[in-house]
Amino acid sequence: MSGGAAHRLPVPASAPPSDDAPAVRLLSETLREAARRNASDLHIEPMEHGWRVRLRIDGVLHEMARPPAHLRDAFVTRIKVLARMDIAERRIPQDGRLRLAPAPASQAAEDYRVNSLPTLHGEKLVLRRLEALPANLSLAGLGLDEAQRRTVADAIGAPHGLVLVTGPTGSGKTLSLYCFLQRLNGIARNLCSVEDPAEIQLAGINQINVREKAGLTFAVALRALLRQDPDVIMIGEIRDEETASVAVKAAQTGHLVLSTVHTNDASTACARLIDIGVEPYNLAGALRLVTAQRLVRRLCPQCRMCGEASADALSAAGYDARGGDMTQPYVARGCEACHGIGYRGRVGIHEVLPISEAIRDLIVAGRGAHEIAREARRSGVATLRDAALARVRDGTTSLEEALAATEAP
């Protein structure tokens, strides 16, 4: 995986520490570079000797700059002031939010979620770019194939039930939920969400931010929403027994509930909710669909090239030689358009598991994830590896990227 070359910013090294103008210019240049390279996160990291700025681009961190050491404090303070954080408090983590135009001023302003964390050598800041509403917020835009789109559309079109999206942090689960909400958004439905926090503002959706310090937890907000005559409820994450119990009961009493669970595949989500404390028969009655997803990097279309892979390597990856499936996959090369990385953007790969009567019986009987997965394969549900290899086959990504994204934990 290419790390990308470090990009040095034009900051005046001779500026006095008391002058914050260089720090202001440095922040503007940093945000402009982050926007230009479509970074999702900016990491401001103190070290024993100096500090560095790294950008997460398509899920991978790349070093952008190591600015002069004397600018660090002014740079961090500038961000904290703009994010309305306590600049005098450096001993505990803080959260903030800011809106800035990256420069030039004609560019649209961007929102950032800011978190500070005290480390051995000072405060580390991470700025998460909160994107505006994506232009292609649709099932097709998520990377679902035609059959998967139909299955998902049927599940979220039902009047009630529980639909879960699973996957690790950073796999695009929240974006999928927003896509489901946008598809359902209309004058005839009351759509509500409980999030921590709301990352994309959707017109027509009643969005609630969890504030645990004030006592507004997921479970408390959910109970309040059930008295608001909702048709569709989106829960940012099911992470405890109380939230899971309220969600399942809501799905059983005439509401469509959309949420996420942190598991590696679709079949494990059932076991996860039972471990949290949901009764198997309640889960079986409420659950309609579970999807699992990952994001794989797209090969840069301007510089991708046909690579070399042995028949044994392709067979071990899952290709079927007898079916004429043995093709030489494309590999990343790197060019000016992709900043030498070889990849530009990401696409979702999905496992879509509808809850059939056979799977409901397995859930009620307390069967494990392996048996549920076996039944899913028997009924023709494609695995995440199958979906990833399909993207290799059509030239969207590399074999290396597909295998890394679907490697067993």
Image (cartoon, helix red, strand yellow):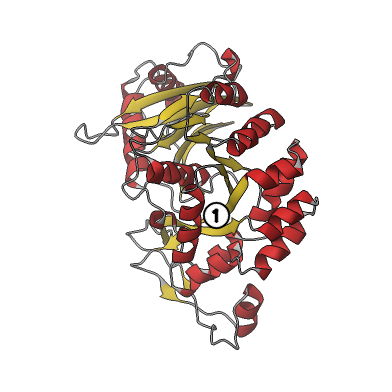
Residue 181, by quadrant, is: top left
Q: How many marks?
A: 1
Label 1 sits on what residue type? Arg
Residue 196 drawn at (x, y percent): 53, 29
> Which one is nearer the viewer's eye here, 3 or 15?
3
Compared with residue 20, is residue 239 higher up or lower down, i.e. above or below? Answer: below
Compared with residue 58, is residue 199 higher up or lower down, i.e. above or below? Answer: above
> Which one is nearer the viewer's eye here, 271 or 263?
271
Residue 345 drawn at (x, y percent): 41, 55
Inspect this view and state whether residue 290 appears.
Answer: yes
Residue 369 drawn at (x, y percent): 74, 55
Q: Residue drawn at (40%, 43%), measured in percent from left and top?
A: 184
Residue 318 drawn at (x, y percent): 62, 75
Q: Residue furthest left?
A: 106
**Is 374 situated left or right of 104 in this image?**
right
Q: Residue drawn at (61%, 60%), measured in percent from left and top?
A: 406
> Which one is nearer the viewer's eye here, 392 or 66?
392
Q: Name the residue carrying label 1.
A: 294
Residue 29, by quadrant, is: top left
Residue 282, by quadrant, is: top right
Inspect this view and state whether residue 400 appears.
Answer: no
Compared with residue 306, is residue 257 higher up or lower down, i.e. above or below? Answer: above
Position of the C terminus by quadrant: bottom right
Q: Residue drawn at (49%, 77%), measured in percent from left and top?
A: 307
How many other residues sit within 10 Å of disc 1, few (<14), some (14-19) or many (≥20)?
many
Question: Mark 1 falls on what kind of element?
Answer: strand
> Which one is nearer the viewer's eye here, 384 or 91?
384
Q: Residue furthest top?
A: 88
